[in-house]
Image: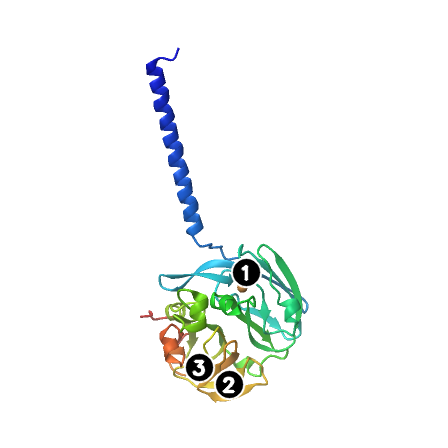
Amino acid sequence: MLTFKRAAAIIILLSMCSAVILAWTEAKMDKTAELADTPLNQAPVEPVVHREGTDVFIEMTAQVTNIEISKGVTYNAWTFNGTVPGPVLRVKEGDTIHFTLRNLDPDTPHSMDFHAVHASPSEKFIDIHPGEEGTFEYKASTPGVFMYHCGTKPVLLHIANGMYGMIIVEPKDGYPTDSEIDREYTIVQSEFYSGDVYNSSLHEEPAYVVFNGNDYGLKEHPFLAKTGDKVRLYINNAGPNQVSSFHIVGTVMDRVYLDGNPQNVLYGMQTVMLPASGGAVVEFTVKEEGDYPIVSHQFKDAQKGALAILRVTKDGKDSRKTE
Ligand SMILES: [Cu+2]
């Protein structure tokens, strides 16, 4: 028979169990809510590039990854391969590109628009849906420094969120100045917007204008050269909205190849204007030791982050600390 004492013990035990179950369920619900609130942050995936003769096979990902655009400022970016800008690609004039895009973003279609190729956009720059992949083929028949970007609608939002990068198509006979170049670097200028990114990129000024994805990297870790070096920069302005007035303080550009085409040569330039998507190869000589700021001469943009340092020393090594 169930005694009063035993019944009381069972009731106490049951109520303890239900309290435990309730606590466990609440904890689980809290965790689920927390996961739902945590933006997706996919680890960067290395691009795969390999060459067979003049066929270049490139595999890239579209993915959502946190990046630090300013010290302590994280942007939940839409990216190629988990970095902004995406990886710098290099092919040669005359190559055939076999390009595969894997879309790891579970929510949004993405695509790839290479400015370096002649291809039907409605066939070869098409949306790849979440979890899917697509492979496309095109010739790189024009040498230069080109932008690539996601072309999925609204393009403004996909570029503003970080989906762009640089592809260099090396001229088949090189640049006439190749043998003079001691060092080369790449710079991609771009913008970041705050709040509702679509509306702010549509109507407002950018919160940050940056070189190579953030406002601090190229100040803390300057490009290096030694006195007398001839330096070549491959530059591109990803926008999406600003023009770049590209300038190097303390030198004059010996040569500029607009859009990186060896036939588009200019001499003795102080500033190169890069329209949104535009590129160039710029070459200059550094004759004296010191820190040479590289800026967009639209100084409100330099103030917002579009500033790098080229540190010139006797031996080309970084012998000083950055402020
Ligand atoms: Cu996209």
Disc 1 is placed on an element classified as strand
The residues bearing labels 1 and 3 have C-alpha atoms spaced at a distance of 30 Å
Q: Indicate the quadrant containing the C terminus: top left, top right, bottom left or bottom right.
A: bottom left
Residue 245 is marked as: 3
Question: Is residue 6 visible from the viewing direction of this image?
Answer: yes
Disc 2 is placed on an element classified as strand
Closer to the camera: disc 1 or disc 2? 1
Residue 153: which quarter of the image? Answer: bottom right
Question: Residue drawn at (42%, 64%), measured in percent from left and top?
Answer: 196
Disc 3 is placed on an element classified as strand
Q: Earlier in the sequence, mark 1 or mark 2?
A: 1
Decide if residue 87 is on the left or right side of residue 171: left
**Callout 3–callout 2 Cβ contact below 8 Å:** no
For ligand 1, the image quadrant comes to bottom right
Residue 62 is marked as: 1
* Callout 1 crowding tier (Cα within 10 Å): few <14, some 14–19, many ≥20: many
**Callout 1–callout 2 Cβ contact below 8 Å:** no
Q: Nearer the viewer, residue 187 or 15?
A: 15
Residue 222: which quarter of the image? Answer: bottom left
Respond yes or no on whether mark 1 lies under 8 Å from ligand 1. yes
Which residue carries the number 2 mark?
A: 255
Q: Label 3 sits on what residue type? A: Ser
Q: Where is residue 202 shown, x and y percent of the image?
A: 45, 72
Q: Earlier in the sequence, mark 1 or mark 3?
A: 1
* Callout 3 crowding tier (Cα within 10 Å): few <14, some 14–19, many ≥20: some
